[in-house]
Every structure is written in C-alpha cells, then in structure tokens.
Amino acid sequence: MISPIRYYSTNLKTTPIPFSNALLKGLAPDRGLFMPEIIPTISAEEILSFTDKPYHEIAYEVGRKFLKGQIPNKDLKRIVKDAYDYDVPLERADGNKYIMRLDQGPTASFKDFAARMMGRLMQYYMDKENRKLLILTATSGDTGSAIANAFYGLDNIGVVVLFPEKEVTSRQRKQMTTLGKNVQTIALDAKFDDCQALVKEAFADPDLEHLDLSSANSINIGRLIPQIVYYFYAFARLRKGKKNDDVIFSVPSGNFGDMMGGMLAMRMGLPVKRFIIAVNENDEFPHYVNTGEYQKTEPSKNCISSAMNVGHPSNLSRLVALYGGVMDEKGHISKQADMESMRKDIFSVSINDKQTRKTIKKAYERHGVLLEPHGAVGWAGLWKFLDKEGKQHPEDQLYVSLETAHPAKFPEEINKILGFDPELPPSLEGLEGKKEEYDYLENNYKAFKEYLLIKY
Ligand SMILES: *Cc1c(COP(=O)(O)O)cnc(C)c1O
C-alpha cells in the first residue's frame, strides 16, 4: 500500500493534505506555503542511471517520488513527455563552468518548465473531478506568459494575469496579451509586489470562494516540483564520474522558486556542494543569510533583471522551513532557522545593474556566451564566489550557472550593450504583428474584486 506524501503549510496552522489538494489550493488557508512532509530520496545508483535518460524521463523519475499514490504512472509519463518536448542545452563557457539554458520552451523563459507541468497536472485533476478553475496570477514579466501559454485554450480553466505595466518589456507583454480565448490580462500602473498583493488578497476573500480560485505563481507546490528536475539533469549530463563528484550551482533569483527546486534536489540526494544565490539590487536575502535578520526591500528596486525585482520573496518561508525555522507570509520570523547550516549550503550575493551590464559584455567578448540580464546576474554571482573562495575548490570543480530567459526577450538592453539584436527563437517569431488586448485597473483591491465578480 502506498501512502501518499502529505503537504504541510509553512505557517503550521493547516492540517497537511495530499498533493492534488495542495496543487489546486495553491496557497494554504493559513496563508502559508505547502511543503512536503517527507522529502523522498534518489540514490546514487538512480542518479547514475539518469546519465543517458532524456529530460522527460528524469522528470518522471523525480515527479513520481513526490506524487506517488496521486496519479497513475502512465498518466504522469504522458504528462511529462508532453510538457518537455524541447532542448535543455548545457553550454561550456569556460573550463568546467557551464551555462544551463532553460530558455528553449514556448515562452523562452525557465518558467515554462514549471508552468507546463503544473498546467497539465491541474488539467488532469479537473478532468477527473469534472471541475472548473480560475487561475489568478501576478507576473513580473515571465510568469504571466508561461502560465497563459500553459493553460491557453483549456475549457475548464480560466486565467487572469496581472502585470505592472512599466516593468515588463513590450515583447513580454505581447506574449501574454495576444493570446485571447480563456486568457485575460490586466495592466496596473504599479509594481509587481502590488500585483502580487492583490492576488493574495483575492485568495483570502470569502466573497470570491465560489470562483474556485487557484494560484499559479511560484508559490504553488505544483510549480516547485518540476523545478527540481533540471538540477538532476545538469549533474547527470556533466558529472565527471570520479569520487567526490559534486557540483556548484549559481541561481539568479527573485521569488526563489528556482532556488527552492535546487534545495529540494540537494535534500533528495543530489551531490550539490554549494548554491550561489545571486540577486539584483533587491538584496534582502544576502543580508538575511549573512546576519539572520530579515527586512523586506520596500518598495522593491527596479533593475534590468526585471523578473527578479522582488522585495519580499514568497518562497523564502519555504527555505526557512527547510532549515527548521518558521517565517510567516509577511516575513516575520517566529522561529529562527539554522543559519549556520544555511550558510554552509548557500553563498548569496547582490549584483547591481552596472555589474550586470558589464557581465553581459564580458561573457560575450571573453567566452562567446550570449546572456540576458537575469542569467548575467547568475554568472556574475559565480565570479564573485570564485573571487572569494574559488581557491578552496579543486581545479576541476564543476560549476553550472542557470540562464533563465532567452536574450531575445531583452533586445533593447542587449543592443545597448553589444550593439546587435539577438536572433529570435522560433517561439518568439511573429509576435509583432499580432493584436493585443488587455484591460487597465487601478491599483486597489476593491477595483480588482469588482472586476472579478462582474467578469466571472
Ligand atoms: C522569474 C524569473 C527569475 C526568478 O526566478 P525565481 O524562481 O522567482 O527566483 C529569474 N529569471 C527570469 C528570466 C525569470 O523569469
């Protein structure tokens, strides 16, 4: 008899529930985030067996550990095969330093990895239970299009995307506003954090319960699990096969879903020596890791790595939980995490815009690698780490820095720095000619609530 893993809330005031319920709820009723009660393990032999497996099979092996008893194996196999039908290039940049390009999905951002699997899992449960859902999501640019794309055209799932008008590029906007059908986009003259706050308030509003709201933000557990997979994939492909084989990852971070995927991979048994968590000028996290004191950046700062302009990363409460602490949704810590072990696992650094631009230039000129602002923050973070403690690691230490979006999503910035427009991947071609449609709302909850009640 398989007993499914249950998912608890980081606020500890909700009874743990199975995966399917946590997936559909998104946020726990006590406003905490769901975390697995047990973190399943993957043995060294299993990891070795991943060496030649295609990406979707690794996704299946990782996914089934968390979803046991929650979905038949054959359905999970079908879902991951359908979701991961694109490349995951590992580009050698310099010696043993690699760039993992997570930008080959349909919206050219790493958010496709999470959104596509979550969307298909939700659809699976909706079909099974004959139910309807309304997905509310706030985006700083990439989530919106990845979610909209993953759910586009489904009959039983509606999607509402809120975005800060001045913080997304025109290409990012067009990726969401030209879809139509079940995808509704709303522009706000506000910051990403404001959009996120409206969405959170809607979830807690009893007057909206009949709408069957669900979140698709990086807080959803259904997005977290798929983000574990590429860490296994990178190691499986690049491992040296020697004793003491391990890897150091550099992760450009905003809301910390990506980082949490990596942390869970490590807890499952992936030999990760260290995580470099690189943020932009929103530096509340490096400060927290170094001092144990947490203070959000309010308001969040505008940097060119716009998808990482997050002043209070939602997933931080998950990280704190992983290290035995409790942080609520407002960032208040009622039980401190084991900071010493956190520091052993994590090196965190803030990279400003000037350094980001310099890194894009240097990576291109010196290593022939084309990065966009987010990936450049990760790559710059890796070099900061090497400056500081590179000497402590062996010559042939493996490093993997994550590139989270395609450079063609940021043509204005790249052109300013390098003097040319990045080539468009097929997924972004033809956007310019499409018709955009979106609504404007004031940045207040009352307006948003009325909008939802009238429209749905
Ligand atoms: C969302 C996003 C990030 C940040 O990822 P988190 O999981 O929120 O830390 C980084 N880069 C790009 C391009 C993104 O879209």
Image (spheres, grey):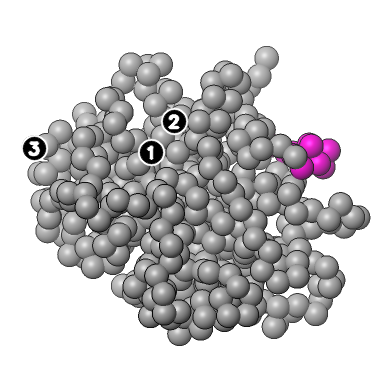
Q: Nearer the viewer, residue 137 or 18?
A: 137
Please state the horizontal and vertical placement of residue 169, each as a whole percent of the image.
30, 64
Between label 3 and label 1, give the one nearer the viewer: 1
Residue furthest out toward the right: 243
Q: Which residue is mark 2?
A: 120
Q: Which residue is mark 1?
A: 150
Look at label 2 and name its amino acid. Arg
Between label 2 and label 3, give the one nearer the viewer: 2
Per the rendered image, the range of residues in magenta is: 40-51
Q: Determine contact: label 1, label 2, CB under 8 Å.
A: yes
Q: Which quadrant would the C terminus be assigned to in this image?
A: top left
**In the displayed structure image, the side of residue 166 where residue 273 appears, left or right:** right
* Residue 43 covered by magenta stretch: yes
* Residue 17 covered by magenta stretch: no
Look at label 1 and name its amino acid. Ala
Q: Residue at x 58, y 25 (%)?
A: 77
Please state the horizontal and vertical placement of residue 144, each as a whole percent of the image.
33, 50
Q: Which residue is mark 3?
A: 454
Q: How many marks?
A: 3
Gap between marks 3 and 1 measured at Cα: 25 Å
User: Relative to 42, is 167 above or below?
Assistant: below
Look at label 3 and name its amino acid. Ile
